[in-house]
Every structure is written in structure tokens, then in C-alpha cells.
């Protein structure tokens, strides 16, 4: 039996039975017909997976290839341009895509952004004026993106507690089509095992969470493969975990279904460079699931 299905059913039941409505507030999200998309939520939930199974739901079909495509778009392509998704018929970001074909400075943009690191080699004047105190800026010898720096750090300094990837850049929030829901992750190496902690500010249980949990398991497998570590635990710390009003009834039916056994995920072992991963390197074997349940997306 799939362990994630059991954990998921408990969480859904907890929210339906004990969650707090936001109907007393003016919510941002709406349905396609323009009516407010209210939620029931609980605050601060933690999900921990020991990774002895692939954490993917079997009480409904999760579009696992689309989930991996989105992951590759974020972490390998490192762009906010949706052309890669469109080429692979993945439409999950269409509602937030701008006329320029991007989602602004969100997600992949932040992962591809080049940032300086190490010790500065010198400072240079930024403004020189007899009326303004001179300002300076640092010149660094080295620069790279967050993904490459994460892999480099895990290989060279596994004891560090600073292996953090952040998608929440306060300077760029104004230019993001959607603020990041899964907004940071931290990696820890203990006794040769790679542990991953994922921080989530807001989590749609019906549609977003099944994608996110499976995706970050896949990411953990990818990073473990290229760094040479064994798989450790996968932890999700979720601040606002919620169910939309129109999802309550279908979810109530879904969690009554009997779970199947968890499938097996094969990843091409020949891939040693992270940026070489592509969709063909992933195979989900024996994925049995109940029929897909149609649920409307709140935007």
C-alpha cells in the first residue's frame, strides 16, 4: 500500500473536519466564473517521508510526466519562459503566462540568476560627488547560479548547514506572475545520506501538493545521483495547507478509495551531470491508480 495515500487521507480529513474557513476575508483567488475561491485550512503541518517508497498518490492519477517537466523547467532549464512547457504540451502555467511568454521573475528565473559568491576581491566607487557620500560596490571573483552552487557545496562541504535554495527574492516579487508557493529548500548531509527539507508558504492539497511532493522526491533523487550520496528523508514544512471549497466533495470521495502499492521510479544511472537530465531519463514502473478526478483550478 502506498504510504503517501495514507498520509494524504489523514491530512485531507483533518482539514475538512477541523479547518478554518476564510469566508470572512477578501480572498485573492477566484474560480473561472469569477466567484471567490474560498478555502478551509490548517496552519503549520509537517509531512515526513523516509523515501522507502515513491511518494505519489494512487487514489487518483497524478500526471507524473508533467510534474517532472515542470521540475526540469525550473531546475535544469532555469528559465521563466514557458516555451519548454508548451513544446511538451504542459499547460499548468498558461493561466499565469504573460504576453511576453514568461511568468516574470519567478521560479526558474531565480534559479538561473547569476549571483556572486566567495570573498570580494576589491571595491569600486558607485557614486562620486562632493555633495554625496561615496558609495561602493563589491567585485567578486566567482559567480554562478543557485543550482550549481548547491551541487558544488554539497560535494565540497557536506557538513555545512547553509545549503539553501531560495525562490523568494523580495526585490523581484513585484515582477512575478505568481509568488512562489514552494519558496525554499534546505539540504543536509548526515552519515552519507542526503536529506531535503522543503518550505511551503501555501499548499493547495487537491492539485498542488501531489505534484510538489512527487517533484521534490524526484529532485532529491537527481541531486543524490550527481553528488554520490544515499537518499535520506524528505520533509515538507507547510505553513498554510488548504482545500478549496469546490474540492471538498471530490476529495472526500477520493480518500475512501483503497490505495494500490507504490510504483518504482527508475532514473538513468548514466547521468552524472545535473544539467544533462531530460524527460527520457525517467521511468515510472507499475504505477497503478484509480481514475483521474477532475477538479477546477482556482486562479
Image: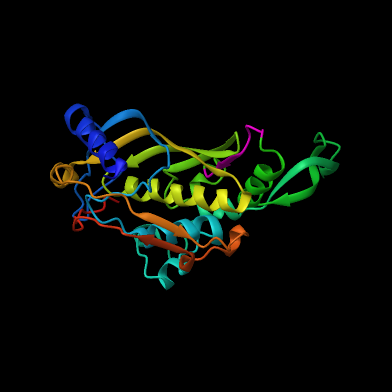
Q: Position of residue 238 (x, y in %)?
A: 39, 34
Residue 119 forms part of the magenta stretch: no
**For residue 284, which quarter of the picture?**
bottom left
Give x and y (percent) for residue 234.
45, 39
Along the viewing direction, whichever of 128 and 190 lies nearer the viewer: 190
Residue under the point 45% across and 62% down = 282
From the image, give the main secondary structure of the stretch colored magenta.
loop
Residue 78 visible from this viewpoint: no
Report the coloring of the rendering. rainbow
The residue shown at (24%, 34%) is 10
State left or right for residue 170 relative to residue 129. Answer: left
Q: Nearer the viewer, residue 93 or 69?
A: 69
What residue is drawn where x is 37% and y is 38%?
202
User: Toward which corner of the image does residue 204 lie, by quadrant?
Assistant: top left
Residue 92 in which image quadrant: bottom left
Q: Is residue 166 magenta?
A: yes
Q: Residue at x 36, y 51 (%)?
A: 211
Query: In the displayed structure, would residue 235 be above or below residue 149?
Result: above
Seen in the image, is 94 located left or right of residue 79?
A: left
Q: Quadrant of the N terminus?
A: top left
Magenta-drawn segment: 159-167
Residue 285, relative to residue 149: is it above or below?
below
Amino acid at each position: 500500500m502506498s504510504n503517501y495515500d495514507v498520509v494524504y487521507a489523514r491530512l485531507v480529513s483533518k482539514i475538512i473536519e477541523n479547518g478554518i474557513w476564510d469566508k470572512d476575508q477578501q480572498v485573492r483567488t477566484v474560480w473561472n466564473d469569477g466567484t471567490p475561491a474560498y478555502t478551509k485550512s490548517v496552519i503549520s503541518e509537517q509531512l515526513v517521508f523516509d523515501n522507502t517508497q515513491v511518494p505519489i498518490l494512487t487514489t487518483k492519477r497524478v500526471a507524473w510526466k508533467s510534474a517532472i517537466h515542470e521540475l526540469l523547467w525550473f531546475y535544469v532549464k532555469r528559465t521563466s519562459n514557458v516555451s519548454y512547457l508548451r513544446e511538451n504540451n504542459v499547460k499548468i502555467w498558461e493561466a499565469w503566462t504573460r504576453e511576453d511568454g514568461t511568468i516574470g521573475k519567478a521560479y526558474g528565473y531565480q534559479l538561473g540568476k547569476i549571483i556572486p559568491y566567495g570573498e570580494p576581491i576589491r571595491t569600486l566607487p558607485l557614486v562620486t560627488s562632493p555633495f554625496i557620500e561615496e558609495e561602493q560596490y563589491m567585485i567578486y571573483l566567482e559567480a554562478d547560479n543557485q543550482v550549481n552552487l548547491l551541487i558544488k557545496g554539497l560535494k565540497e562541504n557536506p557538513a555545512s548547514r547553509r545549503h539553501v535554495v531560495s525562490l523568494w527574492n523580495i526585490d523581484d516579487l513585484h515582477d512575478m506572475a505568481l509568488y512562489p508557493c514552494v519558496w525554499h529548500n534546505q539540504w543536509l548531509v548526515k552519515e552519507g545520506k542526503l536529506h531535503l527539507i522543503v518550505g511551503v508558504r501555501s499548499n493547495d492539497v487537491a492539485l498542488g501538493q501531489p505534484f510538489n511532493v512527487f517533484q521534490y522526491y524526484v529532485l532529491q533523487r537527481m541531486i543524490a545521483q550527481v553528488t554520490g550520496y544515499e537518499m535520506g528523508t524528505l520533509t515538507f514544512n507547510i505553513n498554510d495547507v488548504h482545500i478549496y471549497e469546490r474540492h471538498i466533495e471530490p476529495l472526500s470521495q477520493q480518500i475512501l478509495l483503497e490505495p494500490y502499492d507504490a510504483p518504482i521510479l527508475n532514473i538513468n544511472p548514466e547521468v552524472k551531470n545535473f544539467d544533462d537530465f531530460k524527460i527520457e531519463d525517467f521511468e515510472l514502473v507499475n504505477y497503478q491508480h484509480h481514475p483521474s478526478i477532475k477538479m477546477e483550478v482556482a486562479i
